[in-house]
Image (cartoon, grey):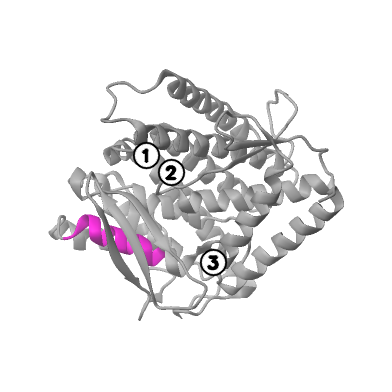
Amino acid sequence: MDKASVRVALIACFLFVSLELLSGHFTTAQIHIQNGLSILRGFGTSVEDDGQVLLFDIVPGSIDDAIVRAFCRLNLQLELFRHSYQHPCLALQIAEPETSTSVFRSVNEAWKQIERLFNRIFHLTDLWRRQQQTLPHPPVELPPKLLTCQHQIQAELSACLVVLRASKTSMPDQDPKGLVYGLLSVYHTMASIMADTCLRLDDESVFDSHTKQFVSILTESIAMWKTGQSELHHRYLRWPCIHMSRSIVDIGWIAPLYYTALKCRIRRVRLQAVRLIETTSHREGLWDSNIVSCVARKVMEIEEGGFYGHHHSAAEKFLLSSPPRSGDMSVPALPRLSRIHEFRVVLSDRLADTFLLFYRQAQGRWKEAQVSTRGKFYNSGY
């Protein structure tokens, strides 16, 4: 196809994705995303031996720039949604001029940097997963090349955080309530946790050392929730009551809260993350608040069982507007064998009150569980 035809095909593909997502047709939406990525493969330059990183050299502000960045955002959503299990991964990168800056000139510039680092993390995680498959037993030491890559990503994340904090009040396109800065912060924190843990895929206890960062995501999300309360109408919402007028194809706060609920094993923290998701009655692209909150609760149920005993009820009693305190962290650690290492949610194109969750604990086999949304209701506070 010539360039004009490719543009038309990609724009049509993006429109189809948007319509399918807003309709709740998640399977078809993912197929359209993959079709768009397949078209893009022919126009990007492979910059890694495995062919899983594509670099695009395009004119900033052009129509091609807008199209590629739209698919970068869709691909980021897809990779975040599938990050919990091994899958074919494609990372998209846009060539940016090498510049050193003390502040971000815009929210968009800050997001470009964070998005680029997410793609590097996805690719590194995929590399290590594929290498592990070829090894007869777990290695004593990690491959030096992968460690070097991890250290580079961590250094760039640290530098990005310094610039982001310096830009808190100087980005001209930021909203007056600071919600966009809050979103940038929680995504940066999530990326930092992913970068620190991406070479420890066989050890879920590694997340225990990141409790402070999970609490940071939660605290920032609480601040955003409180800021936006004046714009929300409080009422109980019954499945499948989703307010499509507030749904978006872009990303929002659901993904970081979902990640917190899944990977932080402090019951108070993960439960509060779930409850915050449950105050959201819309979709953010692939992220349906009703579905992901039910998945997170099912994961908690599988992992925790009756492990916490009387601590269980104590952790339930808190105000949604209050961040966790140090006393909330003083609970026994979940046993390693109870923790889910990989899981995959099977979404469909039809509205249903049950769907499948496949999961694997430690070195065990894959198991299947049904996740139900039947009778679920949502409250804006507790």
Left or right: residue 122 versus residue 329 is: right
Q: Which mark is residue 212?
A: 1
The foreground one among 88 and 124 is: 88
Instruction: Indicate the amino acid at tag 2.
Output: Ser
Can residue 361 be seen from the camera position used here? yes
The foreground one among 299 and 37 is: 37
Quadrant in which residue 57 is drawn: top right
Residue under the image location 40 percent in, 61 percent down: 345
Name the spot of residue 102 as percent of width and height, x first.
68, 26
Gap in Å between the C-alphas at discs 3 and 1? 33 Å
> Circle 3 — which element?
helix
Instruction: Indicate the amino acid at tag 3.
Output: Phe
Q: Which residue is denoted by mark 3 in the rendering?
A: 26
Tags 3 and 1 touching, CB below 8 Å: no
Gap in Å between the C-alphas at discs 3 and 2? 30 Å
Residue under the image location 54 percent in, 66 percent down: 26
> Circle 2 — which element?
helix
Name the spot of residue 207 as percent of width and height, x first.
33, 39
Left or right: residue 98 versus residue 240 is: right
Mark 3 or 2: the one toward you: 3
Quadrant in which residue 227 is drawn: bottom right
Q: Which mark is residue 38?
A: none
Instruction: Indicate the amino acid at tag 1.
Output: Lys
- Looking at the picture, does residue 201 appear above or below residue 325? above
> Circle 1 — which element?
helix
Tags 1 and 2 touching, CB below 8 Å: yes
**Residues in magenta, as a range:** 293-305
- Looking at the picture, does residue 190 appear above or below residue 377? above
Tags 3 and 2 touching, CB below 8 Å: no
Q: Which mark is residue 216?
A: 2
